[in-house]
Image (cartoon, rainbow, N blue to C red):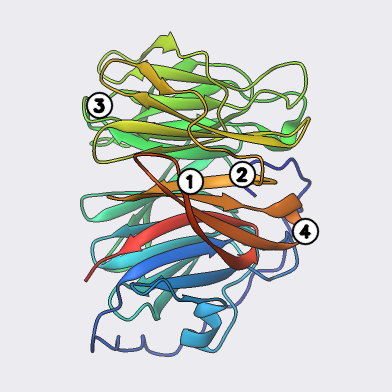
Amino acid sequence: MKFSIYIVFLGLLLLACKEDPLPEPDNTGGKEGLLLLNEGLFQQNNASLSFIDSEDAITNDYFLQQNERLLGDTGNDMIVYGGKVYIVVHASSTIEVLDKSSLKSVKQINLQHQGVNQLPRFVVGHGAFIYVSTYDGFVNKIDTSSFTVSNRVAVGNNPEGLAISNDKIFVANSGGLNSPNYDSTVSVIDLATLQVTDEIFIGANIGELTVDSEGDVYVVKRGNYSNDPSELFVLDAQNNYQKSNLGIAATSLFMDEDDKLWIAHLNYGNNTSNVAVIDAASETVLSSNFINASDIQSLYGIFVDEEYLYCMDARGFTLTGNLKKYNKNTGVFVEEFDTGLNPNTLVKIKN
């Protein structure tokens, strides 16, 4: 649940991880295409993957097909890092690790502390580790060889997005479970010591983060979905301060290889969606309304590759989702795919 307000019980039963030996990946004919994470519905155990191959053919329920079991409850984030795909499954309190070539599971990491589910949210990679924010108020350092938690550091309330810049981890503290008393800070962690060295005030209910080529960190402030609007801020990662407010409403971000920041916004009040684009170097708006989004019901995530913009439509969060594809230069609609429930994260698989 990237943006929804919800109540969760910390006593949620953990999906058990098998103790069998790790399977050997099938490395024959490495798969290439787009891998889509579908969140599913909270406490319904119906998170899923969709795979779109190089011929634009989509296969839904792809994780089930590859692994003969379900992915889990509430898929929230996914990255490709170091030959693996790491999938954050929030309510199951697991990190699913896939071999990038075969897209088969090689490990399911259970995130519990003293017998309580930690409820992971977002993941970022650096060096030989991944770092995972968890709703119990921590960032967890996980070794990518042993798949074990080597350290954890306390941050703010209900941390969400993570970004790494200038040898620091920037952590968005949402306080989402404490509505209307949201958290409003970004914690700054020194990567070398894994200690919090600073906190930067932003505003209520902070969500996603991303970084440009110069190291500036972009921060989504989601507000209270009512009279406190969403805003997009820029942080100076060298000196840990808020350098500007771009004056753009945002719920989801994607930084492309050309240092263009793509900004998705879903207005929960009137259920309208919008995509804006800014040049990160100059912080100037290139387009405030890049596509005709009138046929997108609930814009839940965006992704951009060399040629195309992809918009993930949750369709009101109760129906089968939809992925729309546009020309990234012109904004012209190209094609669309029916997906799993509540698509939220897309990555490119190259082998």
The residue type indicated by label 3 comes to Gly
Marks 1,4: beta carbons within 8 A: no
Asked if residue 351 is positioned above or below residue 254 in the image, the reply reads below
Marks 3,2: beta carbons within 8 A: no
**Disc number for residue 318:** 4
Q: Residues within 10 Å of mark 1 (few under 14, many from 20)?
A: many
Question: Gap between marks 1 and 3, in whole Å?
Answer: 21 Å
SS of the residue under disc 3: loop
SS of the residue under disc 2: strand
Question: In the rendered image, which quarter contains the C terminus?
Answer: bottom left
Give whichever of discs 3 and 2 has the lower sequence position.
3
Dividing the picture into quarters, in which one does residue 265 lie? top right
Question: Gap between marks 4 and 3, in whole Å?
Answer: 38 Å
Dividing the picture into quarters, in which one does residue 30 lie? bottom left
Q: Residues within 10 Å of mark 2 (few under 14, many from 20)?
A: many
Give whichever of discs 4 and 3 has the lower sequence position.
3
The residue type indicated by label 1 comes to Ile
Position of 199 compared to 160: left or right?
left
For the point 39% across and 81% down, the residue is 104
Q: Is residue 86 visible?
A: yes
**Disc number for residue 299:** 2
Position of 350 compared to 252: left or right?
left
**Disc number for residue 215:** 3
For label 1, the residue is: 302
Q: Is residue 78 visible?
A: no
The residue type indicated by label 2 comes to Leu
Marks 4,3: beta carbons within 8 A: no
Question: Gap between marks 3 and 2, in whole Å?
Answer: 27 Å
Q: Nearer the viewer, mark 3 or mark 2?
A: 2
